[in-house]
Amino acid sequence: MKPALASAPFAGPFALATLSAPDGPAFPALVTSNEYVVDLRDALSDEQLTVRRLLEDWRAVLPRLRALAGDGSAKREPLAHFRVHAPVEPGQVFQSGANYRQHVIDLHVAHKAPGDDRPEAERRADAAEIMDRRAAEDLPYVFIGLPSAITGPYDDVVLPAWAEQPDWELELAAVIGRPAHRVSVEEALECVAGYTIANDLTDRASVFRRDMPQIGTDWLRSKNAPGFTPLGPWIVPAESITDPDDLRLMLRLNGETMQDESTKDMIFNVARMVSYASQSTHLLPGDLVLTGSPAGNGMHWGRLLRDGDVMDGSITGLGAQRTRCVAEVAP
């Protein structure tokens, strides 16, 4: 059994989780800040309850969860007795690229056009101007991921035998708590039930189609292998996060810091991301909106993931996840 981490340092008095006892079924849980668990099937008298169903009735359920966290009336057990799974099984996953200003500037400078012999400082200033203009005038870059790629926050991540350049991408994920279609930026955060951590792994060698470059990107193959999106451990209610646009993301590889950035560096903030995604489709309770990853991925460091690597990812107020990479045995 994969144990929970020794502590659950999330913001606020409680968070949501999906847990299981040894050899038992997964169940929706309220986890308190002092690391105790309330089985919400019993507390809310619904044996078929899931976290996704809770989110479908979020406005009505939230006051009951606040009461359960504070009154001590429900049976509680230590968190350490349970396995921690991905906190929700979403119906839809919306992913974002090129959304951290410094990251995109670094990429712009690193991939200079042929014949562009300007000093790096000049090219960097040019890239910064492009990013500022993009933030003011352009649209986020959003694409679709698969729920089947999601795995738990402490589960092993299998690196497919075909993946030549597997890479990490720590991200803040917004969890939708009410149906949303064509919502404004001003309304968007009202549709967010809470936040969690996602590591949106990517095989860099598969991002662009080699057989027909005109097609462009291949997100199916590069991002959606089973287990390529470790999620959680918790969904922390939005009311417990003072400002989702000022959270620190940190990813360590084998103890060495690789990513360390604030969501303040996002080109498009959470509200703009949620609003934009809702213009084209219906966002539904339990859906995830991933908001992009900052500088410091493996391509930046020239060091991709390999068998035995351990990734530790954390975001302010949302706890931490730890996953170990395991190479797939080629069939």
Image: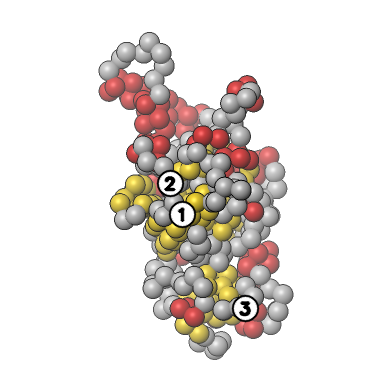
Of the pair 269 and 118, the residue shown nearer to us: 118
Q: x and y percent of residue 321 in the render?
A: 44, 61
Q: Amino acid at mark 1?
A: Cys
Pointer 1 with pointer 2, Cβ within 8 A:
yes
Which of discs 1 and 3 lies nearer the camera? The answer is: 1
**Mark 1 residue crowding within 10 angstroms, few (<14) / some (14–19) / many (20+):** some
Give the spatial CA distance, label 1 vs label 2. Answer: 7 Å
Q: x and y percent of residue 309 in the render?
A: 40, 53
- Mark before the other along the chain sequence, 1 or 2: 2
Per the image, label 3 sits on a secondary structure element best described as loop
Per the image, label 2 sits on a secondary structure element best described as loop
Q: Residue furthest top?
A: 115
Across the whole image, how many numbered discs are drawn on residues?
3
Q: Is residue 255 visible?
A: yes
The residue positioned 52% from the left and 77% from the top of the image is: 82
Which of discs 2 and 3 lies nearer the camera? The answer is: 2
The residue positioned 39% from the left and 45% from the top of the image is: 264
Q: x and y percent of residue 144 in the render?
A: 63, 43
Q: x and y percent of residue 87 in the render?
A: 56, 64
Give the spatial CA distance, label 2 vs label 3. Answer: 32 Å
From the viewer's perspective, tell me whether residue 244 is left or right of residue 119.
right
Q: Which residue is mark 1?
A: 325
Per the image, label 1 sits on a secondary structure element best described as strand
Q: Is residue 13 visible?
A: no
Q: Which residue is mark 2?
A: 305
From the viewer's perspective, tell me whether residue 108 is left or right of residue 138.
left
- Mark before the other along the chain sequence, 2 or 3: 3
The image's mark for residue 24 is 3
Above or below, 307 relative to 162: below
**Mark 3 residue crowding within 10 angstroms, few (<14) / some (14–19) / many (20+):** few
